[in-house]
Image (tube, rainbow, N blue to C red):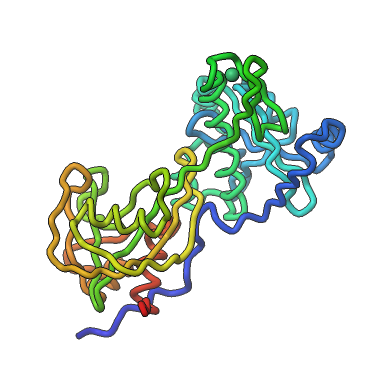
Amino acid sequence: MSPRPDLGPWPHLGYAASRIDRAAEKRSDAEALRALETDATARWYVLGGELVAMRKSASTLDPLFERAAAHDLGPAGPQSVFLGMMDGAPRFALSIEAAAMEALKGRDDYEISDLRTIAVRGMVDDVHLPPLAEGKSLLVWHSRRRFCSNCGGQTRVVDAGWRRDCPSCKMQHFPRTDPVVIMLAIDGERCILGRSGRFASNSWSCLAGFVEPGETFEDAVRREVREETSIVCGQVKYFRSQPWPFPSSLMIGCHAQALSHELVIDHNELEGARWFDREEVASMLARAHPDGLITPVPVAIAYHIIREWVENGVDFD
Ligand SMILES: [Zn+2]
């Protein structure tokens, strides 16, 4: 058996480890918010649909804009939201109309890209990814919740973008976060990786699925693995979580103890799934697999879940 490849230092998990202090107590204080908006250190992230605006400078891309510059980028979309304080400076996110964002693509002084590409390519400093994720999820929620889901009336924004109220039926609407379990089912020295039709043909990853109402995330892990592969799992161990702003998921990363062996693939969910031994997965993480098979990019939690097992193993009681 060849020695396991050195994978180097652990990469940053995208959209995680936010340095934002959300300062929630300021959201309902109109006077404090006005002061924050006019603070000399206040800056805005500018988004439009899936896209983020960045200003080009000599060697970097800067996603932060002063208030006037942010509003100058195009007609404001549905909302501006207060994200919180970063190192003592107020941070906001503003949506501009998608057409205005598209128009900026033709400008030499701006770079326009989607948030997934920005993270994968490391286009901005890592410190910006969590507030961009926060802003994008919030702004997408606003764009889809202009009307009350209870009575159909028009809702209005309150709490600096953190709630929408319905004046007709008095219902309060809060931004949503959708929990998704993402897991590696393990049997000793081997694990199950799957691939969906959306993946590149050589790419294999963890299984994943939405948590359903009335379900713990441990039960969701066991149900999803069984539905997709027919494998029965026992213990489930939580590993880490990751905001995934496409548009508002929270990925709950787990390792699961596989108790059965025979895979029966649900081809409505997966194009394929199979057992991989630990050495083969190590070569995939290192981009050194003889057939070119790969695991997901390091900004995604799947990479971290897989690497944790490969390098450190997972003990089930
Ligand atoms: Zn209503």
Tell me where residue 55 sits by quadrant. top right
Return the x and y of residue 101 as percentages of the image width and height: 53, 26
Which sits in the foreground, 37 or 208? 208
User: If the image is split into quadrants, where does the C terminus sit?
Assistant: bottom left
Label total for image: 0
Tell me where residue 153 sits by quadrant. top right
Return the x and y of residue 73 as percentages of the image width and height: 63, 25
Which sits in the foreground, 128 or 267? 267
Question: What residue is drawn where x is 17% and y is 53%?
Answer: 272
Q: Is residue 16 left or right of residue 158?
A: left
The image shows residue 36, relative to residue 182, as above or below, that is above
The image shows residue 53, relative to residue 317, as above or below, that is above
Question: What residue is drawn where x is 37% and y is 46%?
Answer: 210
Residue 131 seen: yes
User: Where in the image, quadrant-wise, is ligand 1 located?
Assistant: top right
Which sits in the foreground, 121 or 266? 266
Question: What residue is drawn where x is 46% and y is 43%?
Answer: 178
Which sits in the foreground, 19 or 120? 19
The image shows residue 102, relative to residue 243, as above or below, that is above
Tell me where residue 187 sits by quadrant. bottom left
